[in-house]
Amino acid sequence: MSTQDLLPYGLGIPDLVEYQPGYKVDVEIAPFLNKLTSAVAEAGFALRLESAYRPFEKQLSIWNRKARGELPLLSAEGVPMDRPQDEEELMYAILTWSALPGASRHHLGTDLDVVDGNACPEGYEVQLTPEECEGMFAPFHHFLTECFDSDSAFGFNRVFVPGRGKIRPEGWHIAHLPTSRRRLEHFSLGTLRKIYEGSDMACKKVVLARLDKLAEEYIYPYFI
Ligand SMILES: [Zn+2]
């Protein structure tokens, strides 16, 4: 399989650039991100990345640590919850806040979690929660919404919005859609299945057994 074919799963070697310290993005989106950053700055905000490209191994590590109880599991309301004993329940609990490894849009290098650096109090640790979007980052998000609605966001838009798929809305997650569409042309569920079969993923048996349904609810609705 060529490198290009592996990119949608966070494997292979994508062409990345470190856009802000510690955060890499697909080199193709950098010019558009520059424009969005400038537009945001003119309105008095500072577009700050809190997450960008994430390889398969990183997403697998998050998934497995949540499954093993090494990272907290949060309920749909964002409250820490007990780890379900049943493997299927555990899988769905992880999926409430974490994407399937190999199917995270952060693998694409075109997707970013953003906040307003100007509104962030000194020393505050960003949580990426709906409360922040409606609280300290609300003016920034309202401005972004205006840009998206008026088609003046240089190809960026939100992906995890109410009414789409089963992933909870994430106002902070934006994507450069023209570039991500090109990356996702190479995605195949059959390949993802093979990747899982060869991995040490927690809940692997139940994920493989339910993969078609999971794709309909957690993967394909976001191929926009
Ligand atoms: Zn995100």
Image (spheres, helix red, strand yellow):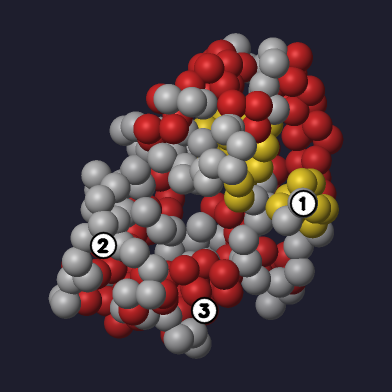
What kind of element bears circle 1? loop
Q: Does residue 171 appear left or right of residue 108 in this picture? A: left
Q: How many marks?
A: 3
Q: Is residue 33 above or below residue 153?
A: below
Q: Residues within 10 Å of mark 3 (few under 14, many from 20)?
A: some
Q: Are marks 3 and 1 in contact (CB under 8 Å)?
A: no
Q: Residues within 10 Å of mark 1 (few under 14, many from 20)?
A: few
**Which residue is disc 2 drawn over?**
92
**Which residue is disc 1 drawn over?**
21
Q: Residues within 10 Å of mark 2 (few under 14, many from 20)?
A: some
Q: Is mark 1 within 8 Å of ligand 1?
A: no
Residue 148 in which image quadrant:
top right
Looking at marks 3 and 1 on the same chain, the residue that comes earlier in the sequence is marked by 1
**Which residue is disc 3 drawn over?**
195
Q: Which numbered disc, 3 or 1, marks the residue closer to the eye?
A: 1
Q: Is residue 185 above or below residue 197?
A: above
Mark 2–mark 3 distance (CA, rounded to whole Å): 20 Å
Mark 3–mark 1 distance (CA, rounded to whole Å): 30 Å
Looking at marks 1 and 2 on the same chain, the residue that comes earlier in the sequence is marked by 1
In the rendering, at what x and y percent does residue 89 appear? 19, 67
Kindly identify the residue that appears in the image at 64 percent across and 51 percent down. Answer: 52
Q: Amino acid at mark 3?
A: Ile
